[in-house]
Image (cartoon, rainbow, N blue to C red):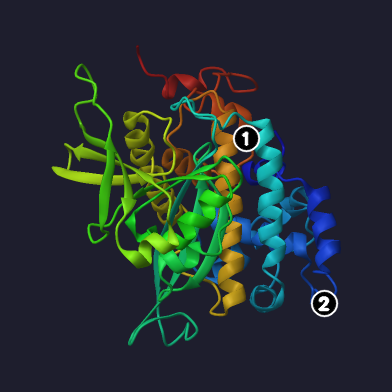
Amino acid sequence: MNITLFAQILQTLDRISFKKLVARHGSDKHEKGINSWTHLVTMLFCQFSKLNSLREVCNGLKSASGNLNHLNISKAPSKSSLSYQNKHREWTLFRDYYFDLLGKLSGMANFRQVRFRVKSKILLLDSTTISLCLSLFDWARFRKKKGAIKLHTLLDYDGCLPVYVNMTDGKVHDAKAAKEITLPKDAVVVADRAYVDFETLSRWDAGKSYFVVRLKSSVKFHRLDEKPLPDDRHHHILVDEYIELSEEKTRAKYPKKLRRVVVYDEINGQTIELITNRFSWTANTISELYKARWEIEIFFKEIKQLLKIKTFLGTSTNAVLIQIWTALITILMLKYLKACSKFNWHLSNMVAFLRLNLLVKFDLKKLLDDPFKPPPKTTKNLPEGQLLLFEWGD
């Protein structure tokens, strides 16, 4: 193989679709020496190598100068050019390309998980906070002397990849951010108690979507009917009943009946109250759906530990968003490669393996399918007896 691993990874990208998006956004009108494709490749190189500064990213690409044509770029960008484009090129180009690539790669790899016997699309809703220095990121208000941004994320359970991301400053409450989310019909969203907003839940219900949300202890209700619990299984289910909200203000926001399932969490030694507008599923299915919400916590941990998303190359809102969306493109490519690999990779191990060999010329498929296979022994064109100095006994 005569091209680097990084060049082979980039072959996952659909460049024709990217060119169409560039033309639609007009992103190359004032390119200042670095076009949109070079910009994308450079930011992906930053994510895969997890470099810490503009200088490191640009010098890292310059070190691969003889192989840049394999990346379809003519030269590595300068530090000033990359900084300028991170500030001025519209971040929406990278957002749109992420969703375009998500649609294509999802059809080429088997991301589906078959843990639940439900036909509904399972979506996991949560947010993560990234701390920032307020003196540098003065637009990211959080506390009096602290800055932060929040990534409000809707994660598809199949593949554990985002289908919606909204970045706000750290002060925006989760329930307020959820007001902007429209769910597809027949989908089920699973969320923690921060998203108990009955106006939003009523809107989702009116749109023929379903929800499984942890109930706040402060919400008042009264029981309509209680369902019998099976004697022979699912002993962690404590209560399965129909309720309606009892306070006038909350009942005006959600006048319909709800289903309340109380589950005992043996690991943490606590009871968890769940509400849902889906009445046909078993109580165990509802509890397992909420348990699956942990996948979004794992996703946040992965992008923070494996990618360049906790510190940023630029301080403007645009630069931060470009880095976030190129990080999501990177995690999409990595999960696609993992899904196509025959080896049972843990994602963190695969990322470390690729990062160490990013500019090495080796067959990517062979590396992913059988990473620890030793190279074949050869004595071709070596002087007679030379290997005897290094040959070990069995």
Residue designated by label 1: 362
The Cα–Cα distance between marks 1 and 2, rounded to whole angstroms, is 37 Å
* Side (left or right) of 135 relative to 144: right
Instruction: Give the residue type that dot 1 points to.
Output: Phe
Q: Nearer the viewer, residue 258 or 380?
A: 258
- Residue 65 lies in what quarter of the image? bottom right
Residue designated by label 2: 30
**Residue 308 visible, this orientation:** no
- Residue at 46% over, 80% down: 140
Instruction: Give the residue type that dot 2 points to.
Output: His
Quadrant of the rendering where the N terminus is positioned: top right
- Is tag 1's residue or tag 2's residue first in the polypeptide sequence? 2
Residue 176: x, y in percent?
46, 69
Most extreme residue toward the left is: 269
Name the element at disc 1.
loop
Quadrant of the rendering where the C terminus is positioned: top left
* Side (left or right) of 254 relative to 236: right
Residue 66: x, y in percent?
73, 53
Q: Nearer the viewer, mark 1 or mark 2?
A: 2
Most extreme residue toward the top is: 394
Q: Nearer the viewer, residue 55 or 168?
A: 168
- Residue at 46% over, 62% down: 199
Reply above or below: 221 against 394. Answer: below
Residue 119: x, y in percent?
54, 29
- Residue 41 lies in what quarter of the image? bottom right
- Residue at 68% over, 31% down: 108
CA neighbours of label 1 inside 10 A, class few (<14), some (14 to 19), many (20+) = some
**Residue 23 visible, this orientation:** yes
Reply above or below: 203 against 236. Answer: below
Q: Nearer the viewer, residue 75 or 142?
A: 142
* Side (left or right) of 64 relative to 142: right
